[in-house]
């Protein structure tokens, strides 16, 4: 197949210094601190950052206490915003709070579910209801070793490498803000070529465009692309295509929690229910159910039920049991129908909120690390939803 016949698919990633990602990390750092002192804290925290100011808003129900302004400053300085010269200073910026108590009606609906109140269920996993209505999706594909779409997997590798070179001091003139975009050429569902790579990185003003482009091409793009094994003979690269990028972070562009949900998930290769993850405790099914569905989809693909699989689940607020589930294998399923795949998943995976929390051990301070470089496809301690520990159960339930 010629390059002109390939289907081009693009995804982007951003570094931890991107304004929106700063806000995600602040929100999740607050969540982590609360879970460390109260594993049952109910938290919905949003952060906005702009020139010289960080504002944290939301609702919290907890028996513990954390010093939120100090958490904000620690996150921002840890990212590398320690001076007005780099666009923001976490040590001197203003920090304001508008935090209230969570609605008692929402709290009661979560803690005493519809099944317990209306149906009299005594099943322990029926006692906690979903924190909201909504639809969530999970996805997996065998096109990469991490069961992630190739474009977003490569985009995350590029931004992590960019940040790593900055933190290590190998490229000390890099600054925290940056992003990458990757376009992959697909032959059907198989990635074949790296068509285009775009990298934009904030930098020290003394560096020339030529110096920046040479270093980023040699130390960031080329190693990542080579490791992919894809054909890059016709690859086009654009490094800081807008020219200079000395001003970055919240000093030049406001940031907001939850504004990079496609970066957080599958890069556009799968649906997203709309709900953001960061700042929400795991009783919120926006977060926990999306993790559970990734867990189910990944184990199902690894078990051979399909080459690609997307799962959707729907909840009603205050109700423990999902109100709907479907699976879509995009024609790659091996069980005769996608309905049969859905039946197998429902047999193996309990998607009631309390069951998810227990199985994936989600009431722990693990979330700040999820808030940059994607929530999925990372083999890291605490990312329990990435474990391939249900493959045999899935195969047995499917009769494979």
Image: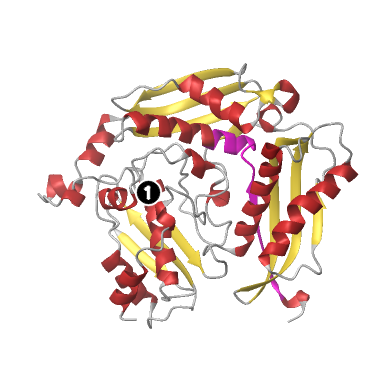
State which quadrant residue 182 falls in: bottom right
Q: Is residue 164 left or right of residue 368?
A: right
Q: Is residue 16 magenta?
A: yes
Does residue 161 sit above or below 308 in this rendering? above
x and y, in percent, of residue 207 in the image: 86, 36
Residue that numbered label 1 is attached to: 288
Secondary structure under badge 1?
Answer: helix
Is residue 135 visible in the rendered image? The answer is no
Looking at the figure, which quarter contains the C terminus? bottom left
Is residue 289 visible in the rendered image? The answer is yes
Q: Is residue 85 left or right of residue 312?
A: right
Q: Which residues are magenta?
A: 6-24
For image coordinates 65% across by 30% down, the residue present is 80
Q: Is residue 357 magenta?
A: no
For image coordinates 34% across by 63% down, the residue present is 325
138 or 367, nearer to the observer: 367
3 or 384, nearer to the observer: 384
Q: Is residue 237 left or right of residue 132?
A: right
For image coordinates 53% across by 37% down, the residue present is 24
Does residue 96 sit above or below 272 in this rendering? above
State which quadrant residue 259 falls in: top right
């Amino acid at each position: 197949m010629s390059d002109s016949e390939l289907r081009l698919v693009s995804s982007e990633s951003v570094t931890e210094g991107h304004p929106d990602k700063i806000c995600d990390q602040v929100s999740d750092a607050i969540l982590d601190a609360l879970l460390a002192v109260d594993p049952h804290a109910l938290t919905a925290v949003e952060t906005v950052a702009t020139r010289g100011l960080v504002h944290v808003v939301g609702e919290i129900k907890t028996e513990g206490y954390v010093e939120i302004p100090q958490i904000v400053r620690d996150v921002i300085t840890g990212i590398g915003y320690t001076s007005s010269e780099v666009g923001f200073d976490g040590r001197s910026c203003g920090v304001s709070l508008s935090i209230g108590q969570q609605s008692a009606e929402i709290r009661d609906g979560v803690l005493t579910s519809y099944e317990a109140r209306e149906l009299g269920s005594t099943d322990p996993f029926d006692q906690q209801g979903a924190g909201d209505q909504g639809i969530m999706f999970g996805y997996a594909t065998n096109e990469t070793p991490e069961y992630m779409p190739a474009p977003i997997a490569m985009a995350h590798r590029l931004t992590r490498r960019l940040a790593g070179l900055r933190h290590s001091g190998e490229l000390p003139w890099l600054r925290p803000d940056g992003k990458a975009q990757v376009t992959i050429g697909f032959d059907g569902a198989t990635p074949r070529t790296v068509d285009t790579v775009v990298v934009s990185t904030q930098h020290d003003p003394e560096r020339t465009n030529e110096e920046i482009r040479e270093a980023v091409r040699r130390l960031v793009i080329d190693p990542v692309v080579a490791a992919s094994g894809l054909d890059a003979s016709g690859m086009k690269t654009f490094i800081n295509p807008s020219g200079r990028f000395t001003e970055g972070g919240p000093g030049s562009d406001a940031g907001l929690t939850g504004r990079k949900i496609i970066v957080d998930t599958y890069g556009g290769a799968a649906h997203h229910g709309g709900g953001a993850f960061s700042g929400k405790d795991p009783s919120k099914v926006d977060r926990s159910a999306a993790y559970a569905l990734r867990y189910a989809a990944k184990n199902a693909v690894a078990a051979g039920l399909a080459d690609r699989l997307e799962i959707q689940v729907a909840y009603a607020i205050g109700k423990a049991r999902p109100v709907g589930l479907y699976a879509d294998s995009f024609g790659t399923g091996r069980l005769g129908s996608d309905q049969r795949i859905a039946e197998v998943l429902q047999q193996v995976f309990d998607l009631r909120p309390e069951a998810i929390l227990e199985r994936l051990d989600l009431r722990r301070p693990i979330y700040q690390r999820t808030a940059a470089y994607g929530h999925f496809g990372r083999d890291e301690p605490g990312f329990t939803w990435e474990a391939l520990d249900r493959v045999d159960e899935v195969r047995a339930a499917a009769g494979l």
